[in-house]
Amino acid sequence: ERNLRKIYMRLMKKEIRKMQVDAVFDSLTAEEQEFLMMKYQKKKQMVAISLELNISVAQLHIRQHIILEKVSDFLLYRLREEDIFERKKIVNMVKVLAGMLEFAIKYDPEREFIMSEWIEATVDKLDKYFELLREVENCADNSSKSLHEKIIAEKLKNPQEKIEILAERCNVDKSIVSRNLKNFVADTKKYLE
């Protein structure tokens, strides 16, 4: 039975990695997804991708580096400050962590393969990310209650949007948008530590 559980653990590890890859891919922009498909699925060279997307090879290398950082963060279960407004990424991270914990608790209750310290650290991280998600959802759900929540909700809808555009949408000065975004990040970055 122990060998059977070992095999099952290996299969579950593969399944968890697949969940992570799917979650990372889902959190990328359409342009980043298109680049990945061309590079790794269609196995096109950078020059060919550059010509097809009308982007310089240097810019493609920068884009590839950014994507690899995102993958690395996800494999290490790490969210950064710039991810605070990426609701989909937070949701995906919570799902992956919850799935891993469920698996660990269900299939290794005696902690033969998974250390208790790992479970404790993962539970702590999941709790923090869940609190971050709760804060984000609260602002998104209450966008009509205050200017602060309206600004945060607009940023959550369009995480890549520039401050000037958000200011136009919210009918306020860009300094107000900037201050509200900074305050929200300052209030929520404790969940990333």
Image: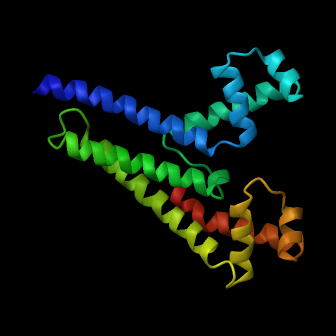
Image location (x, y in percent) of residue 93: 49, 49
Q: Name the residue rendered at 59%, 66% in the picture.
A: 136
Image height check: is 4 above or below 189?
above
Q: Name the residue rendered at 29%, 48% in the picture.
A: 102
In this picture, residue 166 sits left or right of residue 15: right
Q: Quadrant of the N terminus?
A: top left
Give the color scheme: rainbow, by chain, secondary structure or one colour. rainbow
Q: In this view of the protein, which residue sits in the foreground, 151 or 111?
A: 151
Residue extending farthest to the bottom is 145
Image height check: is 136 above or below 39?
below
Image location (x, y in percent) of residue 57: 84, 22
Residue 193 in sight from this viewpoint: no
Image location (x, y in percent) of residue 38: 71, 24
Image height check: is 184 above or below 66?
below
Q: In this view of the protein, which residue sits in the foreground, 130 or 182?
A: 130
Residue 4 in sight from this viewpoint: yes
Image location (x, y in percent) of residue 98: 38, 51
Q: Name the residue rendered at 23%, 46% in the picture.
A: 105
Q: Name the residue rendered at 60%, 57% in the picture.
A: 87
Residue 192 placement: quadrant: bottom right
Image height check: is 143 above or below 35?
below
Residue extending farthest to the left is 1
In this picture, residue 35 sits left or right of residue 127: right
